[in-house]
Image (cartoon, coloured by chain):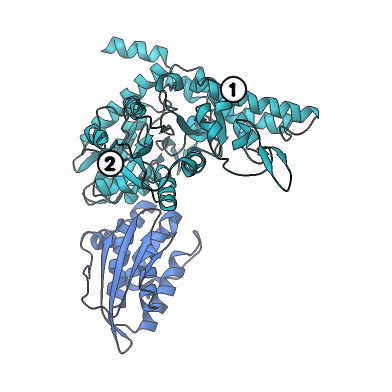
Chain colours: A blue, B cyan
Amino acid sequence: MSEINELYQELILEHNRSPRNYKKIDKPSHFADGYNPLCGDHYTVYLKVSNNVIEDIGFEGSGCAISKSSASMMTTSVKGRSVQEAQKLFEKFHSLIMTKIGDEIPEDKIEELGSLGALIGVREFPARIKCASLAWHALNAALNNQNNAISIE
Amino acid sequence: MINELTTLETKFSVEELRRDFPILLRFVHGKPLVYLDNAATTQKPVEVLNAISTYYREHNANIHRGVHYLSEISTFEYEKARGKVKNFLNANEQKEIIFTRGTTEGINLIAHGYGRKFIGAGDEILISAMEHHSNIVPWQMLCEEKGAKLRVIPMNDNGELMLEEFEKLLSPKTKFVSIVYISNSLGTINPVKHIIERAHALNIPVLVDGAQTVSHRKVDMKELDCDFFVFSGHKLFGPTGIGALYGKAEFLEKMNPYQGGGDMIASVTFEKTTYNALPFRFEAGTPNISGAVGLGAAIDYVSKLDFQSIQEYEHELLEHGTQILQAIPGLRIIGTAKEKAGVLSFVMDNIHPHDIGTILDKEGIAIRTGHHCTQPVMQRFQIPATARASFSFYNTKQDLELLGQAVYKVKEIFKA
């Protein structure tokens, strides 16, 4: 598979076409904006957390296929999980896409990420890693109660 | 028609000119480079590379300071480059040319040196809806400091300035007009001469942002009659970090200095400093000497070319590229002004410009994607970003055909 086809896998294109949990949540317990001023990608992530569990999550905004599908897959991956589990998942996901090109990644590490593993192709495109992590940074900011725009460059 | 093309091509051999630019021979991701990001920066001919190398190998010394031989040579080379800029712009005097880091610094220098001295509370500064951030933010900062107001000439859906609105915005409150000649994100060529005439009728000074102009068409300060003109060397086949500001001597003479330091002074005591004469008053510290030398070499290079032929050839490229892109279903060109330079900004249904840019890159095609430092333009067209192909005279029709093919590939990958 060419690098381009690995980046734009069917699952990613499908999440881009019909993003999951693409909605604003009324009276969220947490929310934050994620903004990349260099390219203009912009998302807001809304959360409803009770008893330390992410009961509902939604996002809105605009950006490229990578950022949008990543945001969509993020929502399906963290919904129903505890805050700590979500943060742990972000760490695992982040370290996966930051793995140096050429470095082997054990299959089980990709598998435990579920659908998020589809974004592995992004590591071949250093300029696009920020796209894949934008919504996650917003999620993290929201969970840390930084209800302001966070900006990544 | 065929005859016309043949004459044009004999006057202008693209293949021959391409050989002057070593980088155009390289491969990217295993494909021959197709460089279509000239509005961001242009490539450098071997003459420029050699001039910089020779300067450092043979002449390097600080200028305006030493009595030693190398310092004299360096000073001579630096001032010779200033003379080249003066001739290139057809300015009256060499002292009207200030070396800067680029267009952005040029505008900041004027906002600071002229704006802070002559613009006050209630005054208005007029810019256009298609300015680069560098021709918005320095004026906003000035307005905030002084209590002045920034007014904006709107544009129509083709990306052309609405001149009747410009007339309405001109008033006794208007104290400065700062306008882009050619839009970097839309390609629109603005009627700057008309704007200058109208502003001058009310004694309002005008700054022209020529960053996107100097590599595409001849500019003439005496003919344009603008009060200030700024451009960047790296968009004129020269090095980065050097640019020039032209200002009419009568304006420069009465402006505040920009930065303080060495070279811009006549004498310094702890009680009082008197400033040096033009142009040195605005060039504090050791300047970018090798940059100026490189810019001089770039000017020598373009001076050998015939701007009329360049303009005609680039227009042909624009028409060819426009036809190719317009034929692609789901693609929309942003910026369709009648008077347009070699810029093709476009968006595609359901495909974000960044994804277009990544896929084109793998085909060896370099374009810019994003807001192009013109976020208000994106807001005007209600789009987050565009993909932008921008040409220079070393681009070929084949480059545009490869662009078209790669865009089809984008559609294929996205099944759009």
The C terminus of chain A lies in which quarter of the figure?
Answer: bottom left
Q: Nearer the viewer, residue B40 or B406?
A: B40
Residue that badge 2 annotates: B346
Question: For mark 2, does the 10 Å Cα neighbourhood hold few (<14), some (14 to 19), or many (20 or more) residues?
Answer: many
- Mark 2, mark 1: which one is toward the viewer? 1
Q: Residues at marks 2 and 1, common chain?
A: yes
* Marks 2 and 1, the one that precedes in the sequence: 1
When asked about the image quadrant of residue A121, the answer is: bottom left
When asked about the image quadrant of residue B322, the answer is: top left
Q: Give, as a three-letter code, the residue at label 1.
A: Gly
Residue B160 rendering spot, x and y as whole percentages = 25, 34
Task: Residue at the far bottom: name it.
Answer: A51
- Residue name at image x 28 percent, y 41 percent: B346
Residue A24 rendering spot, x and y as whole percentages = 22, 70
Give the SS element for disc 1. helix
When asked about the image quadrant of residue B99, the answer is: top right
Residue B296 rendering spot, x and y as whole percentages = 58, 26
Q: Chain of mark 2?
A: B
Residue B359 rendering spot, x and y as whole percentages = 35, 47
Residue B398 falls left or right of residue B239: left
Report if residue B49 is visible in the image.
Answer: no
Residue that badge 1 annotates: B83
Q: Give, as a three-letter code, the residue at label 2.
A: Phe
Q: Chain of mark 1?
A: B
- Residue name at image x 23 percent, y 65 percent: A19
Report if residue A117 is visible in the image.
Answer: yes
Question: For mark 1, does the 10 Å Cα neighbourhood hold few (<14), some (14 to 19), or many (20 or more) residues?
Answer: some
Task: Residue at the far left: name it.
Answer: B329
Residue B248 falls left or right of residue A34: right
Q: How many marks?
A: 2
Q: Nearer the viewer, residue A15 or A44?
A: A44
> Height in image: B344 above or below A15?
above
